Image (spheres, grey):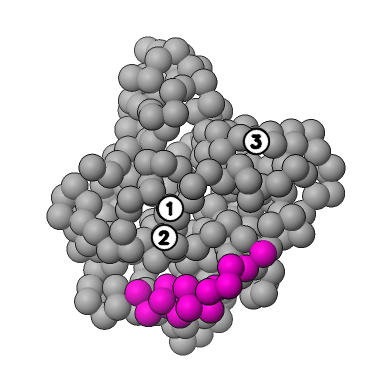
Amino acid sequence: MSEASSLGASSLIGGPATASAIGLYARPSADFDAKLAHTVALLQAAAAEHPGKVVQATSLGVEDMVVTDLIARHGIGIAIGTLETGALHAETVALIGTIEQHYADAIGGQGLKVEVYKPVHEAVIEFVHKNGEKAMYDSIDLRKACCGIRKLEPLSRMLADRSAWITGLRREQSNNRGDMAARESDDKGRAKFNPMIEWTWGDVWHYVKTFGVPYNPLHDQFMPSIGCAPCTRAIAVGEDFRAGRWWWEDEGAKECGLHVHK
């Protein structure tokens, strides 16, 4: 399903500076309560089936912020990890501290500690020296090589001692994610849980509004999908949810490799 219809006519590049994503999109589906209960149950099952071996790999996007809130609110024993690629917006990086402060008393009063995984500095320097700061625009291969250094290698370290991980993927996000399941296995045989898979964009923002979940202010600037700064732009009315990611590439190529699904 295309996300464009649910973004509405207000989602214009250069739209009102005071626009709020909550005000624009917080519209729960009729079965929101059932989806919420199923999501909590799936998170609890992941923690029970993989005690001490499961991590939420958060992109710090709004869906992942909802997952983090559920983990904290229900005291679920799931670690929180993120990839600090060295090319994120300042607003995205700031959310790491926001999470730790906002949930300082979560899960038995111990709070939430966000594990931060960064790319190997020397590898980034070498790539930029060889290919330039804007290599991602030159070819899909170079863009994917950049993603490999900044995202895939750090993710491999995040998951090295884990048997399961949690994502904020939703079917609505793209055609590539339309057939993903709530439970599946990744390419290494680890359990992969996608507890938000059935949620709509309206469901996500309804939850944010209801429970006061902190989120990236760039979402208020019509960026529904936020990645590295050079590879993210605002979207216009009529464009799909992920149109602002790698917008210069063919639609079929728009994955960094973190969630390749066969």
Residue bearing mark 2? 197
Quarter that holds the C terminus = top left
Q: Which picture quadrant has residue 261?
A: top left
Give the residue drawn at x 49%, y 59%.
64
Q: Mark 2: few, some, or many residues within 10 Å (few <14, many ≥20)?
A: many
Q: Is residue 170 above or below residue 176?
A: below
Residue bearing mark 3? 238
Q: Is residue 250 above or below residue 45?
A: above
Give the residue drawn at x 84%, y 42%.
16
Amino acid type of the residue tagged 3 in the rendering: Gly
Q: Which picture quadrant has residue 32?
A: bottom right
Front residue of 248/85: it is 248
Indicate whether residue 29 is drawn in magenta. Answer: yes
Please tell me which of labels 1 and 2 falls first in the chain: 1
Quick check: 96 left or right of 18?
Answer: left
Where disc 3 sits, the SS reads loop
Where disc 2 sits, the SS reads loop
